[in-house]
Amino acid sequence: MIRTIGIYGGFFNPFHLGHLHVIQSSLQHLRLQKLIALPTFHNPLKENINSLNPYDQIKQLRSEINLPRVKVSDFEFRHQTRCTSDVLKKIQTRCPLDRFYLIVGLDQLGQLHRWVDYQWIIRNISICVIYRPRYDEHIENTHIHKEFPHLFMSDLNKFINHSTPCLHILNLPGVDLSSSELRDS
């Protein structure tokens, strides 16, 4: 099955040019028909730091991400999910995950082994990792790369046409911005 939908989650607090870069790069290079931006309800690995109530955050994100093939979804808030695997399992009850890409930043590749049910995630959805400056060391040295080296595909076209599961690092010039650094400044 051809994957045509990207899922991109995060706190987006604040939303910045790095997030926009990920969205636009994913739409273009993965040839997506739709990208779903999923503001995070709860992240077990981070302090939950949203200053806005969920629906104000959704409204704000919708005004900031005003692109025709992008939908900002309140899915995580409506279902009060606790982690990415919960989100994906709920989606899977409605449609097969082989229609989707999970889109993450390179910084997350180094933490992916700490995610709840990370092995289930890797085995059930194709993951596109978007390059971020300052996180290059997270590639070959990651727990994920060591545990699943056979799933990494360096060629984008092979990745797009390969069946799930597989991983690809979209190695484009990145934007050197971080929400946590912006909040701290």
Image (tube, rainbow, N blue to C red):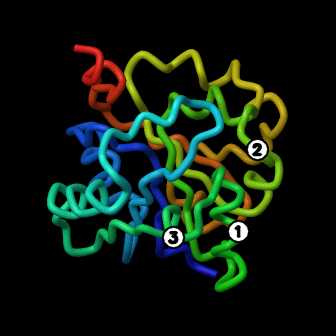
Q: Position of residue 70 (x, y in %)?
A: 30, 69
Q: Nearer the viewer, residue 98 or 41?
A: 41
Q: Using the numbered discs, state the Cα–Cα distance from disc 3 to disc 1 in whole angstroms.
A: 30 Å
Taking the image as shown, residue 146 lies to the left or right of residue 128, namely right
Q: Position of residue 54 (x, y in %)?
A: 37, 56
Quarter assignment of residue 175: top left
At 80% from the left and 44% from the top, the residue drawn is 150
Nearest to viewer (mark 3 / mark 2): 3
Identify the residue position indicated by label 3 in the image: 78
Q: Using the numbered discs, state the Cα–Cα distance from disc 1 to disc 2 in whole angstroms.
A: 23 Å
Identify the residue position indicated by label 1 in the image: 163
At 42% from the left and 67% from the top, the residue drawn is 74
Taking the image as shown, residue 4 lies to the left or right of residue 182, namely right
Mark 2 secondary-structure assignment: loop
Disc on the earlier residue, 3 or 2: 3
From this viewpoint, which residue is outermost toward the front? Answer: 53
Q: Position of residue 88 (x, y in %)?
A: 66, 65
Residue 116 numbered tag: 2
Circle 2: residue type: Val
| 82 over 35 or under it: above or below | above
Circle 3: residue type: Arg
Disc on the earlier residue, 3 or 1: 3
Quarter assignment of residue 162: bottom right
